Amino acid sequence: MWFVFALGSAVFAALTSILAKIGIDGVNSTLATAIRTAVVLLMSWGMVFLTGTQTGIGDISHKSWLCYYHALQIGAASKVVPVDKLSVVITLALAFFILHEPFTAKSLIGCALIAAGTLFMVL
Protein backbone atom coordinates (compact mmCIF):
# COMPACT_ATOMS: atom_id res chain seq x y z
CA MET A 1 0.00 0.00 0.00
CA TRP A 2 2.92 2.36 0.67
CA PHE A 3 3.81 2.18 -3.03
CA VAL A 4 0.35 3.43 -4.02
CA PHE A 5 0.69 6.39 -1.65
CA ALA A 6 4.29 7.03 -2.74
CA LEU A 7 3.21 6.93 -6.38
CA GLY A 8 0.34 9.29 -5.57
CA SER A 9 2.84 11.62 -3.92
CA ALA A 10 5.03 11.54 -7.03
CA VAL A 11 2.05 12.32 -9.26
CA PHE A 12 0.93 15.22 -7.06
CA ALA A 13 4.51 16.51 -6.85
CA ALA A 14 4.72 16.45 -10.64
CA LEU A 15 1.39 18.26 -10.93
CA THR A 16 2.55 20.79 -8.35
CA SER A 17 5.67 21.50 -10.37
CA ILE A 18 3.78 21.97 -13.61
CA LEU A 19 1.06 24.11 -12.04
CA ALA A 20 3.68 26.12 -10.14
CA LYS A 21 5.58 26.80 -13.35
CA ILE A 22 2.37 27.99 -14.99
CA GLY A 23 1.20 29.95 -11.97
CA ILE A 24 4.40 31.85 -11.19
CA ASP A 25 4.72 33.53 -14.56
CA GLY A 26 5.39 37.14 -13.63
CA VAL A 27 5.16 36.44 -9.88
CA ASN A 28 8.07 37.05 -7.54
CA SER A 29 9.51 33.69 -6.41
CA THR A 30 9.41 34.73 -2.74
CA LEU A 31 5.72 35.64 -3.05
CA ALA A 32 5.04 32.30 -4.75
CA THR A 33 6.78 30.57 -1.84
CA ALA A 34 4.67 32.50 0.68
CA ILE A 35 1.45 31.56 -1.11
CA ARG A 36 2.44 27.90 -1.34
CA THR A 37 3.44 27.87 2.31
CA ALA A 38 0.09 29.38 3.33
CA VAL A 39 -1.81 26.74 1.36
CA VAL A 40 0.32 23.92 2.77
CA LEU A 41 -0.09 25.32 6.28
CA LEU A 42 -3.89 25.45 5.98
CA MET A 43 -4.10 21.96 4.50
CA SER A 44 -1.67 20.55 7.07
CA TRP A 45 -3.56 21.97 10.03
CA GLY A 46 -6.82 20.80 8.48
CA MET A 47 -5.43 17.25 8.35
CA VAL A 48 -4.07 17.54 11.89
CA PHE A 49 -7.50 18.45 13.26
CA LEU A 50 -9.31 16.01 10.96
CA THR A 51 -7.17 13.12 12.20
CA GLY A 52 -7.11 14.34 15.82
CA THR A 53 -3.31 14.44 15.99
CA GLN A 54 -2.94 17.96 17.35
CA THR A 55 -0.86 16.81 20.33
CA GLY A 56 2.42 18.07 18.84
CA ILE A 57 3.74 20.70 16.47
CA GLY A 58 6.36 19.71 13.89
CA ASP A 59 8.95 21.94 12.31
CA ILE A 60 7.68 23.42 9.09
CA SER A 61 10.52 24.52 6.86
CA HIS A 62 10.04 26.38 3.62
CA LYS A 63 13.55 27.67 2.95
CA SER A 64 14.38 24.99 0.36
CA TRP A 65 11.21 25.94 -1.54
CA LEU A 66 12.63 29.44 -2.05
CA CYS A 67 15.30 27.82 -4.21
CA TYR A 68 12.78 25.52 -5.90
CA TYR A 69 10.37 28.24 -6.98
CA HIS A 70 13.14 30.54 -8.08
CA ALA A 71 14.66 27.73 -10.13
CA LEU A 72 11.25 27.08 -11.73
CA GLN A 73 10.86 30.76 -12.43
CA ILE A 74 14.14 31.02 -14.29
CA GLY A 75 14.51 27.51 -15.69
CA ALA A 76 12.54 24.95 -17.63
CA ALA A 77 10.35 22.73 -15.46
CA SER A 78 11.52 19.72 -17.48
CA LYS A 79 15.05 20.39 -16.21
CA VAL A 80 14.42 21.83 -12.73
CA VAL A 81 12.22 18.99 -11.51
CA PRO A 82 14.63 16.13 -12.35
CA VAL A 83 17.42 17.94 -10.50
CA ASP A 84 15.09 18.52 -7.55
CA LYS A 85 14.40 14.78 -7.50
CA LEU A 86 18.07 14.13 -6.86
CA SER A 87 16.87 14.53 -3.29
CA VAL A 88 16.22 10.78 -3.46
CA VAL A 89 19.92 10.12 -3.99
CA ILE A 90 20.90 12.65 -1.34
CA THR A 91 18.40 11.19 1.12
CA LEU A 92 19.77 7.69 0.64
CA ALA A 93 23.34 8.92 1.11
CA LEU A 94 22.41 10.87 4.26
CA ALA A 95 20.45 7.89 5.58
CA PHE A 96 23.57 5.78 5.15
CA PHE A 97 26.02 8.22 6.74
CA ILE A 98 23.84 9.77 9.45
CA LEU A 99 21.24 7.12 10.25
CA HIS A 100 23.50 4.16 9.44
CA GLU A 101 20.84 2.57 7.27
CA PRO A 102 22.07 -0.21 4.99
CA PHE A 103 23.14 0.75 1.50
CA THR A 104 22.59 -2.34 -0.62
CA ALA A 105 23.70 -3.11 -4.15
CA LYS A 106 20.11 -2.44 -5.23
CA SER A 107 20.20 0.98 -3.55
CA LEU A 108 23.51 1.81 -5.19
CA ILE A 109 22.25 0.79 -8.63
CA GLY A 110 19.03 2.75 -8.10
CA CYS A 111 20.95 5.87 -7.06
CA ALA A 112 23.26 5.55 -10.04
CA LEU A 113 20.29 5.21 -12.40
CA ILE A 114 18.52 8.23 -10.87
CA ALA A 115 21.68 10.32 -11.11
CA ALA A 116 22.36 9.17 -14.68
CA GLY A 117 18.73 9.78 -15.67
CA THR A 118 18.87 13.25 -14.18
CA LEU A 119 22.04 14.09 -16.09
CA PHE A 120 20.56 12.66 -19.28
CA MET A 121 17.42 14.81 -18.89
CA VAL A 122 19.20 18.10 -18.14
CA LEU A 123 22.08 17.96 -20.60
Image (tube, helix red, strand yellow):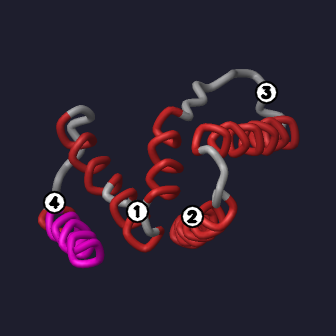
Question: What residue is at 62 percent from the left and 26 percent from the top?
Answer: 58
Q: Is residue 14 above or below residue 67?
A: below
Name the residue type under label 4: Thr
Residue 12 x %, y %: 63, 66
Q: What residue is shown with label 3? A: 54
Residue 76 x %, y %: 44, 69
Which range is magenta? 108-123
* For marks 3 and 4 on the same chain, the one whose residue lies earlier in the sequence: 3
Q: What residue is shown with label 2? A: 17
Q: Are marks 1 and 2 in contact (CB under 8 Å)?
A: yes
* For marks 3 and 2 on the same chain, the one whose residue lies earlier in the sequence: 2
- Quadrant for the C terminus, please: bottom left
Residue 115 x %, y %: 21, 66
Residue 56 or 61: which is nearer the viewer? 61
Name the residue type under label 3: Gln
As measured in the structure, the alpha-carbon distance from the residue carrying label 3 to the one carrying label 4 is 37 Å
Q: Which mark is residue 93?
A: none
* For marks 4 and 1 on the same chain, the one whose residue lies earlier in the sequence: 1
* For marks 3 and 1 on the same chain, the one whose residue lies earlier in the sequence: 3
Q: Nearer the viewer, mark 3 or mark 1?
A: 1
Question: What residue is at 18 percent from the left and 72 percent from the top?
Answer: 116
Residue 106 x %, y %: 18, 69
Label 3: which secondary element:
loop
Q: What residue is shown with label 4? A: 104
